[in-house]
Amino acid sequence: MADYTLNTTKPGQMLARGVCRLLRGHGYVSVEEFVPTRGLRVDVLGLGPKSELWVIECKSSRADFQTDRKWQGYLAWCDRYFWAVDQDFPADLLPEGTGLMIADAYDAEIIRMAPEHKLAAARRKMMIHKFATHAARRLHSLRDPGVSAFCLPDAPAD
Amino acid sequence: MADYTLNTTKPGQMLARGVCRLLRGHGYVSVEEFVPTRGLRVDVLGLGPKSELWVIECKSSRADFQTDRKWQGYLAWCDRYFWAVDQDFPADLLPEGTGLMIADAYDAEIIRMAPEHKLAAARRKMMIHKFATHAARRLHSLRDPGVSAFCLPDAPAD
């Protein structure tokens, strides 16, 4: 079956698609391009059945990884932090103490579980509220395309 | 501008569309057909910026209202409970102690604010997690139609 969506999708977004399928298979839901706080935007945020929060950054190439100056800032917004790369990526480059997924556009696999650093309760609560808001806003825009014209634009931080 | 989505939408869903636009204009996000617990399904659940939870039931006709045997069961799952009806609906039928919105497919207006009965913290936390899960699952199915084939079906309660 032809998969037309892939033609217009960037390499990192294809990895994210596979990652989100993996997460769903594990009972997690996910959103893409989530903004935990102004100036940060994570590729994938997963929410687990027990309110676990996982951040997954998708890197399509060595250069994509080496130009990332922000990833350490994401650690404070999740319980576990993972990289997702394709099978040709030189995984030795990736820092210790982080998780690793091998992904393609169709699926992903957890190669190394990330260590857990549990969020404080107040931050978890804020993140889940923000996750709900992010997902519902985007869903609303898809099911009622007229809503964008009707409403004020979203705040720039989300 | 032609609005093709309306041709295949039931009257209650048209009211829900207007209600969701109203909510968004008030800074609330919303989901439709949300299942708080097995056997109950609310038309619209709104989530406010301070984690307020509003349930809005959309009634397209007198018969639609009079055959509803479940609405009192929804009160335990929200801070405020509203009816949304069109301008021709005999609003005198509606019980006291509930809120009222007049809606059409394009917008809605709050005619009578619902009294507030605040949820307990544990239930609010559970509801927001479930709201996030509901919205993200449906968003995921729309942005990656292949995911339904890839994953196990959702649990029947949600």
Image: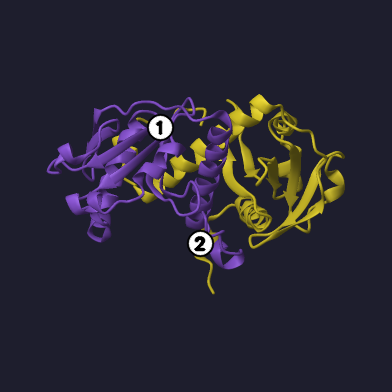
Chain colours: A purple, B yellow
Q: Secondary structure at mark 1?
A: loop
Q: Alpha-carbon neighbours of circle 2 within 10 Å: few (<14), some, or many (≥20)?
A: few
Q: Nearer the viewer, residue B73 or A150?
A: A150
Where is residue B97 drawn, in percent x and y?
Answer: 85, 38
Residue at image coords 65%, 25% = B122
B103 or B139, nearer to the observer: B139
Residue A8 occupies quadrant? bottom left
Give the answer, above or below, for where A117 lies relative to A77: above
Indicate whether A139 appears above or below A108.
Answer: below
Q: Report the Cα–Cα distance between label 1 and label 2.
A: 27 Å
- Residue at 57% x, 39% y is A126
Frontmost residue, B137 versus B91:
B137
Amino acid on which the number 1 mark rests in the picture: Tyr
The percent position of residue B3, horizontal first and vertical second, equals 53, 67
Q: Which residue is mark 2?
A: A145
Q: Chain of mark 2?
A: A
The answer, for residue A37, to whether it is visible in the render is yes
Horizontal side of residue B142 vs B9, given as left or right: left
* Apparent side of residue A44 relative to residue A119 in the rendered image (left or right): left
In the picture shown, does residue A109 fall above or below A155? above
Q: In the shown orientation, is residue B117 left or right of residue A94?
A: right
Q: Residue at x 18, y 41 (%)?
A: A93
The reply to whether label 1 and label 2 mark residues of one chain is: yes
Task: Quarter of the image for the N terminus of chain B: give it.
Answer: bottom right
Q: Earlier in the sequence, mark 1 or mark 2?
A: 1
Which residue lies under the disc numbered 1? A28
Going by the picture, which residue comes out furthest to the left?
A88
Q: Is residue A7 above or below residue A87?
A: below
